[in-house]
Image: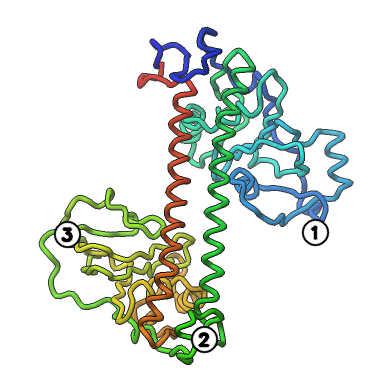
Amino acid sequence: MNKENKLIPELRFPEFVNDGEWELKQVEEYFDVGSSKRVLQKDWVNKGVPFYRTRELVSLHKNEAFGSEIYISEVLYADLKEKYGVPSEGDFLVSGVGTLGICYQVKASDKFYFKDGNVLWFKLNGELISSYFKYCFQSEHIQNQINAQTSKSTVGTYTIQNARKTEFWYPKKKNEQQKIAACLSSLDDLIEAHNQKLEALKDHKKGLMQNLFPQNGEKVPKFRFPEFVKDGEWVENSFEKICKVNPKVNNLPDEFIYIDLESVSNGQLLKKNIIKKVGAPSRAQRLLQNKDVIYQMVRPYQKNNYHFIVSDDYNYVASTGYAQLRAFGSSRFLFQLIHTDNFVSSVLDKCTGSNYPAINSSALKQIKVFVPEEIEEQKKIASCLSVLDTIITAEANRVEQLKEHKKGLMQGLFPQLSESGA
């Protein structure tokens, strides 16, 4: 541990530097840990007070919008509140099954009840700043304890007993707890603001694409650049007419960089994961050229499906889990086309298999698409959307940088265990 193995963080606000060591406390010293009273399925109704399960808890934790699927009546809620209490401001709900260790701090405006068993209820009953504990719970110190406890069972569960004995760092002065919580909360607000900006940019692009590409039953887009307004309808072709799908490879190079699904994130090639040149795996058959477009054929419905453009002349060889697309026109237009709702729907309609739904090359080639006949119109559309992609990527990188900054800041604001765990 730093500071000569004392319970003192590396970073400390000046007014607390001389306040001595922190303490290690157990959750049960400041919280009553339990769960809710059982609500039977026959008591579920279509409207009333929201009734949350782990999936809703995860959405609350991530600050994601969601619609309640299950409710209980106002009468039942009032009865539970009178007899047993309901989640109150400063309490925490923690996932104990499935996605473990997800923690949601109850707000003053919240009104809901929750499913027993899978969700633990931490009822605050001691002198502790609730928001400070929220960040303690996010820290590696507590998350490592949860992982160590759950790894001992066949089916990982974070039990009430384990939760009670979970240790956290405790500065003696509430003012220090408050200062740490305020610091990290302001950073969370900044991250959330950039997240909202990122989502707004993504929504803007989605709306723009719906206007720049023809929709179902249409042969021209709603919006067209002025110089192409009089160029007539777009042309319908099978996909193989606008790009070569999986060009034949006679010989692979002796050495190359192999790309599989783990080498790509959010449509970006992660060179740091594939810098080592390797021999040929059995699935390595796609020898790529600059400007080839790569399309994920296995589970193409995934939210962050892995489409990207090769932008240099390295010896890249891709897994057969990808389709290699070589555009006859604009490669960047092709890249945008495969992200349109119409194309995605057509691919999903042709997927086969249950565990790993996929589209094969033959089916991919036959998908019908509309494209502008003039290559210059393709380029103009691609250029417009590519600029927006650049802005979106920059904003996404900004969010990740802020998250990394928060991670590093938390490591400094909380004491760290030595490698021996002393």
Q: Position of residue 180 (x, y in %)?
A: 57, 24
Q: Position of residue 342 (x, y in %)?
A: 51, 78
Q: Which mark is residue 46?
A: 1
Measured along the vertical axis of the image, is residue 101 above or below residue 396? above
What amino acid type is highlighted by mark number 2? Answer: Val
Q: Which mark is residue 196?
A: none
Q: Is residue 250 left or right of residue 83?
A: left
Looking at marks 2 and 3 on the same chain, the residue that comes earlier in the sequence is marked by 2
In what quadrant of the picture does the C terminus appear? top left
Q: Which mark is residue 256?
A: 3
Looking at marks 1 and 2 on the same chain, the residue that comes earlier in the sequence is marked by 1
Instruction: Name the residue tied to disc 2.
Output: 220
Q: Is label 1 in a helix, a strand or a loop?
A: loop
Q: Are marks 1 and 2 in contact (CB under 8 Å)?
A: no
Q: Is residue 335 left or right of residue 155?
A: left
The residue shown at (51%, 42%) is 155
Residue 107 sits in which quadrant? top right
Q: Nearer the viewer, residue 231 or 71?
A: 231
What amino acid type is highlighted by mark number 3? Answer: Phe
Q: Position of residue 406 (x, y in %)?
A: 48, 34
Q: Is residue 147 left or right of residue 365?
A: right
Q: Are marks 2 and 3 in contact (CB under 8 Å)?
A: no
| Label 3 crowd (10 A; few <14 / some 14-19 / many >=20) | many
What distance separates the C-alpha of mark 3 from that of mark 1?
Answer: 58 Å
